Amino acid sequence: IVSPAAVSIIENNSISQRTKKRYASTNFGFILWLHEHHPEMLGPRFRDEIASVPNNTSAQQQLRDLRAIVNRWLDNMQRTNPELCPVDMQQVTYELVASYMTKKGYRR
């Protein structure tokens, strides 16, 4: 039997950087949407961290700061530790994901 950590290492080494960047971008969009529409779906530690992004900077700078925080959380995620996930996955439902996927501008 292969451990979940070993599977993660193998997967991480077999996915191209371009694909990882695309995943991160898609995840960022979903997390940003949750932050704007369903902040209760985000983990409390993550919410606290993104609340620290200054409001007195440009929208572009705020977005860069949020992206840096999200990317750091995603880089530190582990399948076996839900505390390291920025999203409270126990609250994710089909209706929530469908709402995100059918929002204007999602489909390219």
Image (cartoon, rainbow, N blue to C red):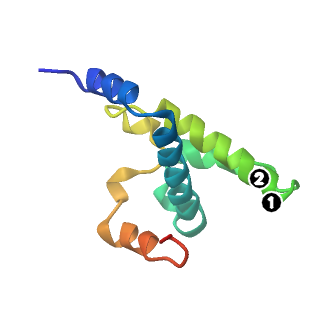
- Which residue corresponds to the image point at 39% horizontal and 24% vertical from the top-left? 13
Q: Position of residue 20 (x, y in %)?
A: 48, 39
Image side of residue 19 versus residue 59, left or right = left
Q: Quadrant of the N terminus?
A: top left
In the rendered image, residue 12, in percent from the top left (x then y), is placed at: 39, 28
In the rendered image, which quarter is residue 79 located in?
A: top left
The amino acid type of the residue labelled 1 equals Ala
Residue 59 bears which disc, if any? 1
Question: In the image, which disc is placed on residue 62?
Answer: 2
- Depth check: give the residue in front, 83 or 26: 26
Q: Residue at x 36, y 28 (%)?
A: 14
Please say if the residues under marks 2 and 1 sit with CB atoms less than 8 Å apart: yes
Which of the two residues, 17 or 32, is positioned nearer the viewer here?
17
Question: Is residue 34 rendered to the left or right of residue 63?
Answer: left
Return the mark for residue 96.
none
- Residue type at tag 2: Gln
Residue 99 seen from this side:
yes
- 39 sits left or right of 8 in the view: right
Q: Is residue 4 above or below residue 27?
A: above
Q: Is residue 52 visible?
A: no
**Could you tell me which secondary element the residue under label 2 belongs to?**
helix
Query: How much space separates mark 2 and mark 1, taking CA atoms?
Result: 5 Å
Q: Is residue 105 above or below residue 70?
A: below
Q: Quadrant of residue 6 in the image?
A: top left
Q: Residue at x 68, y 48 (%)?
A: 66
- Near mark 1 (Cα within 10 A), the count class, few <14, some 14-19 or many ≥20, is few
Compared to residue 3, the image places residue 21 above or below, namely below
Residue 90: percent from the left, percent from the top?
33, 53
The residue shown at (56%, 44%) is 46
Mark 1 falls on what kind of element? helix
**Quadrant of res 35:** bottom right
Label 2 neighbour load within 10 Å: few <14, some 14-19, many 20+: some
